Image (tube, helix red, strand yellow):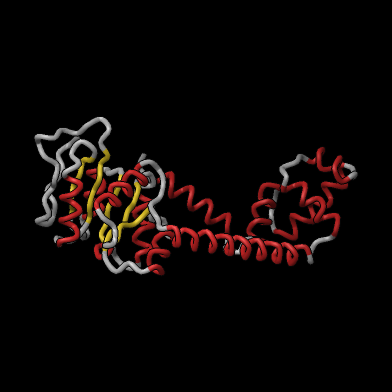
Amino acid sequence: MSNIPAPTSNISDIRRAGYPPQAHSANICIVGHNDFTTDSLASMLGAQSTSYLVSCVAPGDTFMTRLAATQPDVLLIQNGAMKMPVEQFIQDILEAYPDMRLLVFGKNLDDDYLYRLVRCGVHGYINERMNGDHIKRALESVINGRTWIERHIMERFISSQHDFDAIMESQFYARIELLCTNLSRREIEILCEVVKGLAIKQIAEQVHLSHQGVKMHLAKLFRKFKVANRNQLILATFDAISPVRDLSVLLRNGLNRRLDMPG
């Protein structure tokens, strides 16, 4: 591992020269203020020298630079060290390091706040009610790709997700109905086959029309959706029914952002 710059606070880097990294070690970075909670957590993890390779860093503008240097498997971040709004802060971290696992620790984490953390992508949290055994189990859980979330918060999240899915499905059907008010039955029939990805010959067989008849209805669909080909027609259809504005643009932008990311 390359040399890592010293932390920006007086929280010590608890890796020791006498404990070289083990093949099975998990690389853990603690981001927190120099207080009792952070020091206790660092000391407890430091005692597990054969299991964890631990470094500490104070929060601040250079924190993301430290992440790039240490490339941790798990980021343990103190609640008070996160910038506001926390949702955007967490999203920025996970977009930059999509494979990294994220645990939040701190005091006075009420249920509504914990629910917000889970919704924006945090893999678990440690609060003041959890002892050393809980913390070890939490780390093992997130390191192994699972989550560490209390049952009642997870149940609320699942229930909310089901409600959200039902609302989204209802919105889709309402928008499809609105879309169809401007289309003839034949156009709807052909659009359905186009969305399946069928060629003109296959569409003609499915709807019992000649190739020329299919092309005629396609031309009408192209004019109504202001597109030039079937691929554009599919994208325009999804844009029209999506509750998210300009879905195809968001997709392209998201793919381009991913291509611009290192690695």
In this picture, residue 256 sits left or right of residue 215: left
| Residue 79 image point, x, y percent | 28, 63
| Residue 6 image point, x, y percent | 11, 48
Q: Nearer the viewer, residue 213 or 18?
A: 18
Q: Quick check: 101 above or below 175?
A: above
| Residue 171 image point, x, y percent | 65, 65
Q: Name the residue at 52% across, 59% down.
A: 158
Q: Which of 35 and 1 is in front in this view?
A: 35
Q: Name the residue at 40% across, 50% down.
A: 147
The quadrant of the rendering that contains the N terminus is: top left
In this picture, residue 1 sits left or right of residue 110: left
Q: Quick check: 37 above or below 96?
A: below
Q: Residue furthest top?
A: 23
The quadrant of the rendering that contains the C terminus is: top left
Q: Quadrant of residue 47?
A: top left
Q: Quadrant of residue 185?
A: bottom right
Q: Name the residue at 32% across, 67% down.
A: 109
| Residue 34 image point, x, y percent | 14, 60
Q: Name the residue at 81% across, 38% down.
A: 202
Q: Nearer the viewer, residue 136 or 10?
A: 136
Q: Quick check: 260 above or below 248?
A: above
Report the number of numbered marks.
0
